[in-house]
Amino acid sequence: MTRLESPERVLSTLEQDGSRRWLKPRLSHGAFLNYRRKVGYALIAIFIVIPFISIKGKPAMLLDVVNRQFTLLGYTFLPTDTVLLALFILGLFVAVFLATALFGRVWCGWACPQTVYLEFVFRPIERYFDRTKEEGRVQRMIVKYVLYFLISLAMAHVFLAYFVGIENLFKWVRQSPLEHPASFLIVAATTGLIMFDFCYFREQTCILACPYGRLQSVLLDRHSLIVSYDRERGEPRGKLRRRPRPDDNTPERGDCVNCGLCVMTCPTGIDIRDGLQMECIGCAQCVDACNRVMTKIKKPTGLIRYSSQATMDHEAKRLIRPRVIIYPAIVAIVAVAFLVTLSQKKTADVTVMRNLGNPYTVLDGDRIANGIRIKITNRGKSDANYQIAPVNHPDAQISLADGIIAVAAGTSRTEGAQIIVPRSAFVDGAFEAAIRVSDGSMFDQTITYRLHGPYSSAAAPEEPR
Ligand code: SF4
Ligand code: SF4
């Protein structure tokens, strides 16, 4: 099959015939690599340690999807905390926008798990096992992939701990997978995904799949910190001429000796000398590579450096600009709204829901029963007995054992019940019942709930039986 060639390279990771260009970026030692390594290993340690940490008897972070409860820094967001959770996520997004406006893609190059694990776990292993020696190549490859697998498996287990808690994780790994098939499948799928990502997909995640990378063009401005090549200083690029001959009339050259090391070291395969590109993750590998070259040829370092488009074009630095004012203002508003909402939270959440089936039943005599479900979430630190009572009709009753729902601390419970009200209370087929829920001390709330009953007029629909 013949492949059509593109007249020019479209993507840094595609050959001109459309096949994948596999990147094996060269390691460039330097100050930024040292800092990034420290940050990267610290982040990996934090990722592993968090599931073990408890704050006020609760996990530091637990994403209990099954029970729809998210615990963060000792506070549990319950299903009734949608507003709080929405505010928290909104604040996080705007804070990321702000960080991007100020520091460019610092997240991508320094802290994103994709970069951290690829550059500081998987690639070092690859470099170690893919040394050029021919003998033992197959064995080395097998050991490399076994190591990849074990690391992926460990990462998948830590990942699962964020969803089920560390105690459950330790318990479940000692049991048969058949006892917890869902968790087993999640770990298996996550391990497979990690292997696929770090062994095969790699930089494609940043270039093609990551939505954050795609948003860069709108999140950055001319004053954002980016990795830039100093074109004025570097061009015209060309081979270093240590001692130009007297008859050499070629024009003066810039500092770039066109060694190509900045391209060879780039994990996304781009040439930063072509200017800011969407593929640049701001990792500063090219900065380290170029600084070494500059040191070697006794020129000042910083031909490639962290800077901004505006600085490179000799524009005055502007720290204060619209997005640097608007984003923090939004973060502050969201933070205040979050704290106010949090401070108004009561020690329990009560939801009254209608039962499935007939909206109401006509009981013997003249009484109407509505089937309901009462869900109570006890946010307090101790167990509580909640007294439930209809309060706005003297003959209203609730069919619930002792009129009480007992709920353990930090849990939710849903109980079915019937509210029974005389037929005479209904007007146009409805009665607004007031239901008081009280734990006898901290919590006391009256909830209004519409009961259905028979219409009193002649045109009323037929009563359900
Ligand atoms: S590493 Fe520096 S000197 Fe070498 S090609 Fe890149 S910019 Fe030029
Ligand atoms: S151009 Fe430089 S900073 Fe950007 S991704 Fe490549 S090596 Fe990293």
Image: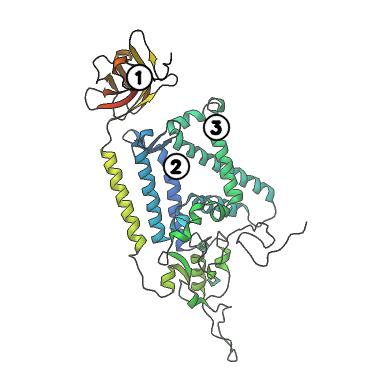
Q: Is residue 157 above or below residue 139?
A: above
Q: How packed is label 2: few (under 14 Cα within 10 Å), some, or many (20 or more)?
A: some
Of pointers 2 and 1, the one earlier in the residue sequence: 2
Which residue matches tag 1?
457
**Amino acid type indicated by mark 1:** Ser
Q: Quadrant of residue 354?
A: top left
User: Is 305 on the left-hand or right-hand side of 124?
Assistant: left
Q: Is residue 31 above or below residue 95?
A: below
Q: Quadrant of the C terminus?
A: top left
Using the image, tell me which numbered label, if any, was put on residue 184: 3
Of pointers 3 and 2, the one earlier in the residue sequence: 2
Which element carries disc 2, helix, strand or loop?
helix
Which residue matches tag 2?
48
Q: Quadrant of residue 309?
A: bottom left
Q: Along the line of sight, which residue is nearer the eye, 389 or 2?
A: 389
**Amino acid type indicated by mark 3:** Phe
Q: Nearer the viewer, mark 2 or mark 1?
A: 1
- As measured in the structure, the alpha-carbon distance from the residue carrying label 2 to the one carrying label 1 is 68 Å
Q: Nearer the viewer, mark 3 or mark 2?
A: 3
Q: Along the line of sight, which residue is nearer the eye, 406 or 163?
A: 406
**Residue at image location 42% in from the left, 45% down from the top:** 46
Asked if residue 282 shows in the view, the reply is no
